[in-house]
C-alpha cells in the first residue's frame, strides 16, 4: 500500500505497511479501487449530463459523494463495506449506461482513450463495465494493486501524481460537506456537475498538464466555497443561527449517549428519538458547536460536552458509561472495552461494529443505540464525584453572532485597542509538533482576538482568554466546525468592505492546522479566493513535492508553520507577514 493523504502519514512520506490511522493494506487497496471506479462513474455521469438528452441521475449524484466521503481519513475501516461500495458503483454504472442507451446517448470513443497513468488497468469508464465477476477481497485486491498512487508516480512523476492527488483530496472534502448538506435536504445541481466534471477531468489527457491540474484544484476550491455556504445555510435554515451559549463539560447523573462526528441532522434525529426516555445526550469532538444552534439547544436532554479532540477518543469512549454514536470522521479502531457500546452511521464503518442504515425515506432508527444506553450504567453520582470539575466553555460565534458585534470590533481596531485578529482553524492530532498550536496562544498579546474553527480548538477551548481591553468582547470566539470556515470568510470579507480594503490587507493572520482532506478543500478555497500569507502546519502535505510547494509559495506566499518557534511566527504575524 501507499497512502499519503493525511498529515500524520508515516515519517511524513507515506504509510506503506499499515496506516498510522490503523488502515489495513486491504482497506487502502479497496479505497484506491473505489476511487478508480467512481472516477469512471463520474465520467459517465458527466457525459450523460452534457449530452443532448441532459440526463441527470440523482441516485448516482448521491452515491458518488457518499462513496468518496467514505475514503476520507478516519471514516471507514471496514473492508466488507468497501466491497459493497465497489459493487454499487458498478451497478450504478450499468443502470446509467442503460438509461443513456435508451435515450440514444453514446460514450464518445475519445472519452475512453487509454491514458498512460492507468498503467495496466483499462480506462475507468471501461473497467466499470467489464463483465468479469469481482469475487471477494482477494480478487479485488489483485486489481486494486494496479490503481494505487505508486503506479501513477511511475508514469507521471511524483509532482504531477501528487498534484492530481491534491485535486482528489480536495474533492473528498467537497463531497463530505456536500453530503452533509444533502442530509438536511440542501443540494445544488451545479455542485454535482462540478465534482463529477473534476473527476472526469482526471481521466482525460488534460490531467497530464501541471497548469491544468492546478487550475482544476482552484476550481475545486471555488466549488467548495459554494458547498460550505450551502452547508452553512442548511444548518442555519434548519436549526437557526448559532447564538453564544455556555456548555458544561461536567456530566450529570443518568443514562447517556455520546454523539461524535459532524452530523447535526443525526444528532437532531437522535434527540427526537431519545426525548422522554430518561437518556442524556452529550456531544463529543466536532459536535460541540451543536449547542449553539437554537433548534438543537432547545432539547433539555442535550446536556453537555464530553471529552476532547478525536485522537483522544480511545480514552474518552472508554470512560464514557453509555452508548456512542459515530456520525462521521474521525473514528478509530475501537478498544475492546467499549467496542460493544459503539455504533457507526452514514459513511463510517468499523469491522465488527453494528452499523445503523437509513430506510428508504432516510429515516434512521436509533433503537439499538438507545437500548444499549439503557443497559449501561450511565453517569452515577459516585462516578461524577470522582471527576475533576471543569468550567463551562462558550460556543456559538457563527458569522451572524460575530457580525452583530462588528461595530465594536471595528471601533476597537480604529482606536488601536485591537491590534490583530488570528484565525487558528483546522484539525487537531496527536503528533508532538502540534504543541506549536498550544504554545502559539501563549504569545498572543492581550490586545488581539482569536477565532477558532474545527477540532484544533481543543488545544485551548477551555482556557480563559478574558475580554478585549475596554470592551466586553471575549477574546476567544469559536466559530464552529471545520466546515464553518465559511463563517470566518464571511466575517473577513465584511471587515475588508468596512475598511475599504481586501482580506490580505486586514490585520488578520490565518494559521491553519491541517490533518485530513476537508482541510485540503478549505485550503483550496482560500487559495481560490486569493488569500495570501497562510501558515500551514504542522507539516506540509507529503503528496506535494518541493516543486509543487514552490509553486504555491510563489503564487500565494504559503508559509510553513515554524513549529520549532511559535514565538517567532507570532512576531511575524503581528507584522502581517
Ligand atoms: Fe477534526 Fe477529524 Fe473536522 Fe477533521 S474531527 S480532523 O476529520 O473534520 O476537523
Ligand atoms: Fe496513513 Fe493517513 Fe493514509 Fe491513514 S489516511 S493510511 S494515516 S496517510
Image (tube, rainbow, N blue to C red):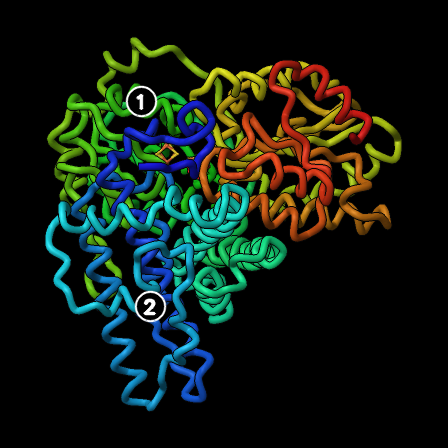
| Residue in front for this viewpoint, 132 or 334 | 132
Q: Position of residue 299 (x, y in %)?
A: 36, 43
Q: In which quarter of the view is residue 537 placed?
A: top right
Residue beneath the point at 47% across and 53% down = 171
Q: Is mark 2 within 8 Å of ligand 2?
A: no
- Residue 234, how many percent across, how many down? 47, 57
SS under mark 2: helix
The structure residue drawn at horizontal position 49% and vertical position 40%, both measured from the top left corner, is: 481
Q: Is residue 260 visible?
A: no
Displayed quadrant of residue 199: bottom left
State left or right for residue 216 relative to residue 280.
right
Earlier in the chain: of badge 2 and badge 1, it is 2
**Secondary structure at numbered mark 1:** helix
351 or 113: nearer the viewer: 113
For disc 2, the marked residue is: 125
Ligand 2 positioned in quadrant: top left
Q: How far, Cα to Cα, is label 2 from label 1?
A: 44 Å
Asked whether residue 276 is in view, the answer is yes
* Farthest-out residue, right: 415
Q: Residue at x 37, y 56 (%)?
A: 118
Against 95, residue 104 (above or below) is: below
Q: Residue, x 48% and y 15% (percent of image)?
A: 432
Name the foreground residue: 251 vs 421.
Answer: 421
Q: Position of residue 34 (x, y in %)?
A: 29, 53
Q: Which residue was labeled with disc 1?
A: 316
Tell me the crowding category of disc 2: few under 14, some 14 to 19, or many 20 or more residues within 10 angstroms, Cα based: many
Q: Is 42 displayed left or right of 245 in the figure? A: left
Amino acid at each position: 500500500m501507499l497512502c499519503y493523504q493525511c498529515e500524520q502519514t508515516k515519517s511524513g512520506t507515506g504509510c506503506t505497511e499499515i496506516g498510522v490511522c490503523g488502515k489495513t493494506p486491504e482497506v487502502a487497496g479497496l479505497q484506491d479501487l473505489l476511487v478508480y471506479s467512481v472516477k469512471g462513474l463520474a465520467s459517465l455521469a458527466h457525459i450523460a449530463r452534457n449530452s443532448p438528452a441532459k440526463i441527470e441521475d440523482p441516485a448516482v449524484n448521491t452515491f458518488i459523494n457518499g462513496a468518496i466521503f467514505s475514503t476520507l481519513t478516519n471514516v471507514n475501516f471496514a473492508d466488507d463495506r468497501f466491497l459493497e461500495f465497489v459493487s454499487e458503483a458498478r451497478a450504478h454504472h450499468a443502470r446509467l449506461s442503460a438509461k443513456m442507451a435508451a435515450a440514444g446517448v453514446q460514450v464518445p470513443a475519445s472519452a475512453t482513450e487509454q491514458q498512460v497513468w492507468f498503467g495496466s488497468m483499462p480506462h475507468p469508464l471501461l473497467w466499470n463495465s467489464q463483465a468479469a465477476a469481482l469475487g471477494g477481497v482477494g480478487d479485488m485486491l489483485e486489481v486494486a494493486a494496479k490503481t494505487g498512487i505508486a503506479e501513477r508516480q511511475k508514469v507521471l512523476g511524483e509532482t504531477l501524481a501528487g498534484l492530481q492527488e491534491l485535486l482528489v483530496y480536495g474533492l473528498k472534502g467537497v463531497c463530505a460537506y456536500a453530503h452533509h448538506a444533502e442530509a438536511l435536504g440542501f443540494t445544488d445541481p451545479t455542485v454535482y456537475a462540478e465534482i463529477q466534471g473534476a473527476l472526469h477531468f482526471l481521466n482525460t489527457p488534460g490531467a497530464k498538464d501541471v497548469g491544468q491540474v492546478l487550475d482544476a484544484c482552484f476550481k475545486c476550491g471555488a466549488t467548495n466555497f459554494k458547498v460550505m455556504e450551502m452547508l452553512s445555510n442548511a444548518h442555519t435554515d434548519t436549526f437557526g443561527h448559532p447564538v453564544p451559549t455556555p456548555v458544561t463539560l461536567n456530566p450529570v447523573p443518568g443514562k447517556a449517549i455520546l454523539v461524535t462526528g459532524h452530523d447535526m441532522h443525526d444528532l437532531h434525529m437522535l434527540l427526537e428519538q431519545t426525548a422522554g426516555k430518561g437518556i442524556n445526550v452529550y456531544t463529543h469532538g466536532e459536535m460541540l458547536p451543536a449547542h449553539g444552534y437554537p433548534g438543537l439547544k432547545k432539547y433539555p436532554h442535550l446536556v453537555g460536552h464530553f471529552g476532547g479532540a478525536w485522537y483522544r477518543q480511545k480514552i474518552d469512549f472508554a470512560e464514557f458509561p453509555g452508548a456512542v454514536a459515530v456520525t462521521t470522521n474521525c473514528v478509530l479502531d475501537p478498544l475492546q472495552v467499549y467496542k460493544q457500546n459503539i455504533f457507526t452511521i452514514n459513511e463510517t464503518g468499523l469491522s465488527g461494529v453494528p452499523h445503523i442504515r437509513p430506510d428508504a425515506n432516510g429515516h434512521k432508527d436509533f433503537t439499538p443505540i438507545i437500548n444499549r444506553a439503557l443497559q449501561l450504567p450511565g453517569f452515577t453520582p459516585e462516578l461524577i464525584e470522582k471527576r475533576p470539575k471543569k468550567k463551562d466553555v462558550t460556543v456559538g460565534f457563527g458569522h451572524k453572532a460575530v457580525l452583530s458585534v462588528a461595530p465594536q470590533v471595528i471601533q476597537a481596531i480604529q482606536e488601536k485597542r485591537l491590534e490583530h485578529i488570528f484565525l487558528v482553524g483546522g484539525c487537531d492530532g496527536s503528533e508532538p509538533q502540534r504543541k506549536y498550536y498550544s504554545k502559539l496562544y501563549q504569545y498572543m498579546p492581550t490586545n488581539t482576538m482569536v477565532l477558532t474553527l474545527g477540532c484544533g480548538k481543543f488545544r485551548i477551548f477551555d482556557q480563559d482568554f478574558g475580554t478585549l481591553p475596554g470592551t466586553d468582547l471575549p477574546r476567544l470566539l469559536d466559530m464552529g466546525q471545520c466546515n464553518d470556515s465559511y463563517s470566518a470568510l464571511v466575517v473577513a470579507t465584511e471587515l475588508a468592505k468596512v475598511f475599504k480594503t481586501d482580506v490580505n490587507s486586514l490585520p488578520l493572520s490565518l494559521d491553519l492546522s491541517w490533518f485530513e482532506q476537508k482541510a485540503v478543500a478549505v485550503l483550496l478555497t482560500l487559495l481560490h479566493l486569493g488569500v495570501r500569507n497562510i501558515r500551514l502546519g504542522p507539516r506540509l502535505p507529503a503528496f506535494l513535492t518541493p516543486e509543487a510547494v514552490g509553486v504555491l509559495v510563489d503564487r500565494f506566499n504559503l508559509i510553513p508553520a515554524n513549529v520549532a518557534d511559535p514565538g517567532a511566527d507570532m512576531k511575524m504575524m503581528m507584522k502581517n507577514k
